[in-house]
């Protein structure tokens, strides 16, 4: 039975019961944990409304500090995923969560730009393996036919974190002076603590593999193990190769280019959009509330888009169209950059950035064998985050400081998304042609 047949075969009662139990057991906890991760990663954007003045940071210096997170992410993402594959998610994911929570709370202690640089780097190193680790973990538990909607549901934590985090951070900033602390000090402490608590809980909630799950009955375990095993035996475009060969594989770099546009869009706006909105002379709380609107829309539409991708079994155009939407939103900024237009443009960019993630990661996981998935998924994320997080966040700060224009600062992002959209269309077309030829040869041989 081919993978495509597996995707479209009708679900049995056993399958429905098994997947319902698996999804409700692991997905809500992972979504909440990732939500906290995104808040802790991006709350520097809201903290900057007070912190930059206290530390005397220029826009370029703030952009550099923000980007160091992604440099560390790039360096430690692949090693972290390889470590998780060896020791198991039940130990490794709690380690990640507790360490990033502690570092995030320590951000309240920074007094100079240098200490901010160090802690942002350490935060990236601590949290580097969480997202690729969860995507890898989901490939151990979720059959391919469910993967885009599950990954989209997991990744809804990103816009949801900003939808919740922006007004929450704005509210915390209004507590400035409480217990003798600045508002941004309280922000880092209050928003960092949940990661530590959830990290402790993760040890008791997560099971490493389906055969270890005490909360599945024997029939459910057998169905899930056999289904996942059958999928692993399907021919993949990237087979089981060494980590070094994988990192040199042209498809890994192409997929990283494709993903970097969406990654850059989400990261750049999470870091800079509070200051963009603040430029309309809004107070901190109003800034946080307006900043939440695009993320609220993205939270809903990315689920709809992921379900559409799973229902049709189509990944390539579901990925490409979202990248073109991001570029279109940026070009629309040249028409008008009033406050209402800014919120609409931010919405277009963020809906595209987050709707892309479910179809893309389902596409990427489907192109790799189980042996290459751990390093491959992490490598894609690491390279994309280096380009999207480190390079683009810095570029935005430098261009904005030199020109005073938020629109011009977004142009490199538009170019990156256009390149990624074209790349996924061309790459998917070439791979589809090859699969058709392989199927024809197989039919002729049989």
Image (cartoon, rainbow, N blue to C red):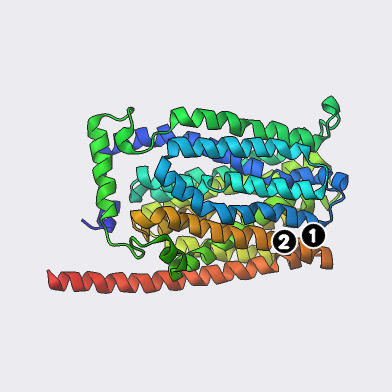
Q: Position of residue 393 (x, y in %)?
A: 70, 59
Residue displayed at 50% across by 48% down: 80
Between 34 and 293, the one nearer to me in the picture? 34
Dot 2 or dot 1, earlier in sequence: 1
Between 398 and 305, the one nearer to me in the picture? 398
Q: Quadrant of the N terminus?
A: bottom left
Q: Looking at the rendering, which quadrant does residue 376 occupy?
A: bottom left
Question: What is the count of numbered marks?
Answer: 2
Label drawn at residue 394: 2
Q: Is residue 253 above or below residue 176?
A: below
Between 282 and 92, the one nearer to me in the picture? 92
Residue 168 appears in the rendering: no
Q: Position of residue 380 (x, y in %)?
A: 50, 59
Would you say 130 lies left or right of 398 here?
left
Residue 49 appears in the rendering: yes
Would you say 315 lies left or right of 191 here?
left
Between 88 and 231, the one nearer to me in the picture? 88
Specify few, some or many for label 2: CA neighbours under 10 Å numbering under 14, 14-19, or 20 or more.
many
Element carrying mark 1:
helix
Specify few, some or many for label 1: CA neighbours under 10 Å numbering under 14, 14-19, or 20 or more.
some
Q: Quadrant of the C terminus?
A: bottom left
Would you say 348 lies left or right of 310 here?
right
Q: Which residue extends farthest left?
A: 446
Q: Position of residue 210 (x, y in %)?
A: 32, 37
Q: Which residue is mark 1?
A: 60
Q: Which residue extends farthest top?
A: 179
């Amino acid at each position: 039975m081919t993978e495509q047949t597996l995707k479209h075969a009708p679900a049995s009662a056993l399958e429905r019961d098994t997947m319902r139990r698996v999804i409700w057991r692991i997905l809500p906890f992972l979504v909440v944990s990732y939500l906290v991760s995104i808040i802790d990663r991006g709350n520097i954007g809201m903290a900057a409304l007070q912190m930059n003045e206290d530390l005397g940071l220029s826009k370029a210096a703030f952009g550099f500090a923000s980007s160091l997170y992604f440099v560390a992410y790039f360096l430690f993402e692949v090693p972290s995923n390889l470590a998780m594959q060896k020791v198991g998610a039940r130990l490794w994911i709690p380690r990640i969560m507790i360490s990033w929570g502690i570092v995030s709370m320590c951000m309240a202690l920074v007094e100079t730009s240098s200490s901010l640089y160090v802690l942002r780097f350490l935060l990236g190193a601590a949290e580097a393996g969480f997202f690729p680790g969860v995507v890898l973990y989901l490939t151990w538990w979720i059959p391919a036919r469910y993967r885009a909607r599950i990954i989209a549901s997991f990744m809804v934590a990103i816009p949801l974190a900003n939808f919740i985090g922006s007004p929450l951070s704005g509210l915390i900033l209004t507590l400035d002076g409480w217990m003798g602390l600045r508002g941004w000090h309280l922000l880092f402490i209050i928003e960092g603590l949940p990661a530590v608590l959830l990290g402790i809980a993760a040890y008791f909630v997560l099971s490493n593999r389906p055969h270890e799950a005490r909360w599945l009955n024997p029939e459910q375990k057998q169905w899930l193990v056999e289904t996942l095993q059958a999928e692993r035996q399907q021919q993949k475009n990237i087979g089981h190769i060494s980590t070094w060969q994988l990192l040199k594989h042209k498809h890994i770099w192409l997929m990283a280019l494709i993903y970097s546009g969406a990654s850059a869009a989400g990261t750049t706006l999470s870091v800079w959009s509070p200051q963009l909105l603040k430029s309309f002379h809004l107070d901190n709380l109003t800034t946080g509330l307006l900043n939440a609107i695009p993320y609220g829309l993205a939270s809903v539409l990315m689920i709809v888009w992921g379900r559409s991708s799973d229902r049709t079994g189509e990944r390539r155009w579901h990925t490409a169209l979202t990248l073109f939407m991001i570029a279109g939103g940026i070009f629309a900024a040249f028409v008008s950059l009033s406050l209402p237009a800014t919120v609409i443009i931010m919405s277009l960019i963020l809906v595209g950035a987050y709707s892309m993630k479910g179809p893309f990661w389902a596409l990427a996981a489907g192109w790799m064998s189980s042996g290459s998935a751990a390093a491959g998924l992490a490598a894609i994320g690491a390279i994309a985050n280096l380009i999207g997080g480190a390079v683009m966040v810095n570029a935005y700060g430098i261009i904005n400081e030199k020109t005073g224009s938020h629109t011009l600062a977004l142009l490199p992002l538009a170019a990156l998304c256009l390149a990624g959209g074209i790349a996924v269309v061309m790459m998917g077309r070439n791979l589809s042609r090859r699969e058709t030829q392989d199927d024809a040869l197989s039919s002729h041989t049989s």
